[in-house]
Image: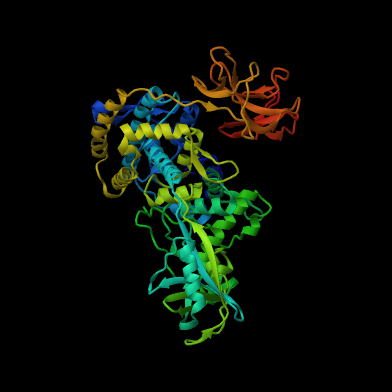
Amino acid sequence: MSKKLVIVESPAKAHTIGKYLGSTYKVKASVGHVRDLPKSRLGIDIDNDFEPEYINIRGKGDLIKELKKEASEADKVFLATDPDREGESISWHLCQILGLDPKDPVRVTFNEITKDVIKEAIKSPRPIDQDLVDSQQARREVDRLVGYMVSPILWKKVKRGASGGRVQSAVLKLICDREKTIKDFVPQEYWNISVLFDTDPEFEGKVQLFKDEKLVVPNEEAANKVESDLNSGKYQVSSVTSKVKSVSPFNPFTTSTLQQDASIKLGFTTTKTMSVAQRLYEGINVPGRGTMGLITYMRTDSTRISEEAKKAAYAFIADNYGKEYTSGRNSAVSKNAQDAHEAIRPANVFILPDELKDLDKDQYKLYKLIWERFVASRMAPAKFDTKQVEIKNGDYTIKASGSKRIFDGFQKVYATNNDEERDKILPELNEGDVLENGQVKKEQKFTEPPQRYTEASLVKEMEQKNIGRPSTYASTVALLLDRKYISRMRGKKTLQPTDLGFTVIGFMETYFNDITDSGFTSQMEDKLDAIGGEGVNWKQVLRDFYGPFKAELDKATEAERIQQKDVPALDDKGNPILCDICQRPMLIKSGRFGDFMACSGFPECKNTKPILKSIGVKCPECGNEIVRRRGKSGKTFYGCSNYPKCKVSFWYKPVNKKCPKCQSLLVEKHLKNTKLACSNDKCDYKE
């Protein structure tokens, strides 16, 4: 019997696919990349036309040996890594390691992990797409050049540990520019004037025009003048327009719109959304159905839907809601969409969200959101009877609108929560009708600055400005938070730049203006995409970039060091943390192994304290919080906050789950076939 080897990226995906292919196939996981540029040095030979210096990733020696052994014993090897630029690159690297010819039909791609799709994909392997690989290599090298050459300068000139990146710097500038606009904003007074009419039912119209021009009411004196004019005149209906308005459903999700909607409706961070979506894609054990991938690939900027998915949705909608709810509409495609694969949708529309209700609650919530959005996208528009009324009073025009939903269409499945689409009934009015008892209402208002970004609105801005790609949206936001360049405002979803963020972007704007400019970043994205889509020479893109960049590096190297402001150390309630010895405020300082607290009375008082971060796990000995600490070598470990009275500690991060064998805490191991293991060295339990 012939033996075939299939290599995917994740163990979860390998487990799911293995069940579909049968005993003649062995499915193994590469667990992400197997080769990469070295971490300890630049790894790009600039003098040799930017030739990359790839090495096997440290810690993957045993895995690579195993893959080589399996490949040597197999009659055929299929490389089924993710269907994107990154996945193509991983497959190419696997070819180098396993001695496969990239020009042979070794590459298999699929957009969903279902039995029929997997079996069909295996029948149609293709060669490695070298243009896609080169596009990934160029992106990796540009990002490496910026990160590894700018960051050391930031360490010396701004702060130890500071870093700059091609995408992260452009996004940080967006956040800082928005904050500057908010701080510099000067409110302008204006007044809204409306009239409440005592009819059945009563309704309110807004005074919008004066002598057929937009009415501007800048102050109370002008508002009183409008009120006086209206009270001395009469209200007469000048026009009534009725029509049926159609409201079309949204397109199915892309990565960006999924992250936005999950943030707004579910309160998920972008990182959490992608993590949960990854599990839904790779496979979930659905009661009564077995393990299967529940959604299509979740890194996409396309809204395209396959013909098979359209037919399935049509059948489901017709059977469950009626044919009048179906629609033959096509999804609009963004001008920047690579369209490499479909939109994010259920792999099988007939698997209802309620089938997941008793499983992981986050997976249920996200699947329900994806399912509803997809089904709604294939449904008929909602229809509204609308009425527009204009009322004249001297030189003033008052406008009012009403609507009543007459067909719910897609809104039967997907609620939009749009106030404009709720029923608002106007009385029966005819042209020429005179309205009595109009009560003028005046409201003082002030112009407001733009809102700070939330993760949802920031991702939307990144997409609109063509900064980054779907696969990088979540990681970029997470990196800026981790670097403490931005923070979430206390009790809110909004993002605000820190003093350090302002300092870093100020330096970057001065010496690396192109890197921070969203227009430049967008053009670079287009060039990198053109390598994969149009066969542009990837080395030429690097040559064109490096010349001007090297000139900026040389100037930045000569810059003066920036003095940092003192940052006070605050507790969880925002109160200053005081020195244990002299009661003066503690400050946040940076050291070789990260941030720590130091007394503001230095050098008289040299007291320092580590910054302890709770992980939400109680100490099994004394019940105090387990916190993240750093040892003298800089290595992270986890110990009791009651140290030195309690000396409980763990090298791996503990979780709120006890070992079923010995009742010790379980810890995160993240090894080849292990996610959790017992913290007791004498116990061999793992899962």
Quarter holding residue 86 = top left
Q: Name the foreground residue: 348 vs 372.
A: 372
**Horizontal placement of 646 versus 591: left or right?**
right
Q: Residue 98: tell me if it is visible.
A: no
Q: Residue at x 50, y 71 (%)?
A: 227
Across and down, in percent, residue 456 comes to: 50, 50
Q: How many marks?
A: 0
Q: Residue 126: tell me if it is visible.
A: yes
Q: Is residue 221 above or below residue 408?
A: above
Q: Residue at x 39, y 49 (%)?
A: 125
Q: Residue at x 49, y 19 (%)?
A: 592
Across and down, in percent, residue 340 comes to: 38, 53
Q: Is residue 238 above or below residue 67?
A: below
Q: Residue at x 48, y 50 (%)?
A: 451
Q: Name the foreground residue: 529 vs 115.
A: 529
Q: Name the foreground residue: 589 vs 360.
A: 589
Q: Which colouring convention does the figure follow?
A: rainbow
Quarter in which the C terminus is drawn: top right
Across and down, in percent, residue 399 comes to: 47, 74
Across and down, in percent, residue 259 comes to: 50, 50
Q: In the current view of this chain or complex, which residue is farthest to the top?
A: 604
Q: Is residue 603 above or below residue 532?
A: above
